[in-house]
Image (spheres, helix red, strand yellow):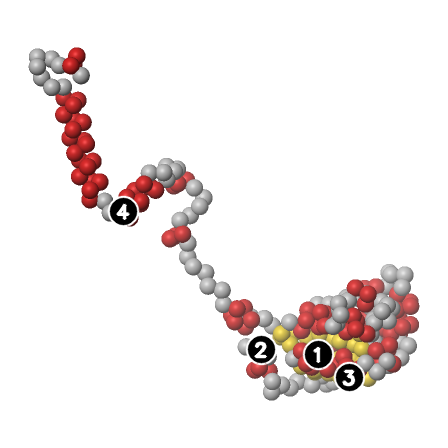
Amino acid sequence: MEGLTIGGATPCVSSSLRRISSKTTNFASRLTPKAVKKHSIAAFQPAFHLFSTNVPKRHIKARIFLPHLVASMEEVEQTYIMIKPDGVQRGLVGEIISRFEKKGFKLTGLKLFQCPKELAEEHYKDLQSKPFFPKLIDYITSGPVVCMGWEGVGVVASARKLIGATNPLNAEPGTIRGDFAVQTGRNVVHGSDSPDNGKREIGLWFKEGELCAWTAVQEPWLVE
């Protein structure tokens, strides 16, 4: 630094550095360990955070999931369940009815009925183009069936699970078909595949006045 001395004066650079060093020392002495950590982390924050798609958590509103509100919006559905001729002949009527009762669904219609060919063809009209259609009609009209109307929250989807897969070999143990059937052509029971079809099929198989509207005393213990 001697080469920078002019007329015996100390260079201004040296005095400026001393002032900066003094201020830095005073600032550092005032920082707590927590503040030091905060400032150290801040030094490595990206300068472009304002353009980031990641919104800081303090700007995100909390969303509370309330299952009981979702449940209260679910509608009571109707489904048509039919014990087919093989189920009736094998004496499975009581067993099948009990499974729906134990689940908690409400029985609104029940009758033993000999299905005429015209009704069978209307019921299975979506399958008219299938090669097995004539055989299906012969099967469903070969003996009496048990017609049932069931009601409850989510009854259509739940009934399908109770019944099991169309092919009994694919049906899980514990389901009606999984426990009592081995072939698709003798799969014991039918269940509506949608709420709309549930209403349609109940309208086909039950006449006006044959369904019973009633209140089950156990309902408060099944549905919120």
The span from disc 2 to disc 1 (Cα, nearest Å) is: 15 Å
The span from disc 1 to disc 4 (Cα, nearest Å) is: 67 Å
Pointer 3 residue: 94
**Dots 1, 4 in contact, CB < 8 A:** no
The span from disc 3 to disc 4 (Cα, nearest Å) is: 76 Å
Pointer 4 residue: 33
Q: Is residue 92 above or below residue 53?
A: below
Outermost residue, left side: 8
Q: Pick whichever of labels 3 and 1 is earlier in the sequence.
A: 3
Q: Residue at x 23, y 44 (%)?
A: 31
The three-letter amino acid code for the residue at tag 3 is: Gly
Q: Pick whichever of labels 3 and 4 is earlier in the sequence.
A: 4
Pointer 1 residue: 100
Pointer 2 residue: 223
The span from disc 4 to disc 2 (Cα, nearest Å) is: 56 Å
Q: Residue at x 31, y 44 (%)?
A: 37
**Dots 2, 1 in contact, CB < 8 A:** no
Q: Pick whichever of labels 2 and 3 is earlier in the sequence.
A: 3
Q: Pick whichever of labels 2 and 1 is earlier in the sequence.
A: 1
The three-letter amino acid code for the residue at tag 4 is: Pro
Residue 3: % across, % down: 17, 12
Q: Label 2: state its secondary structure.
A: loop
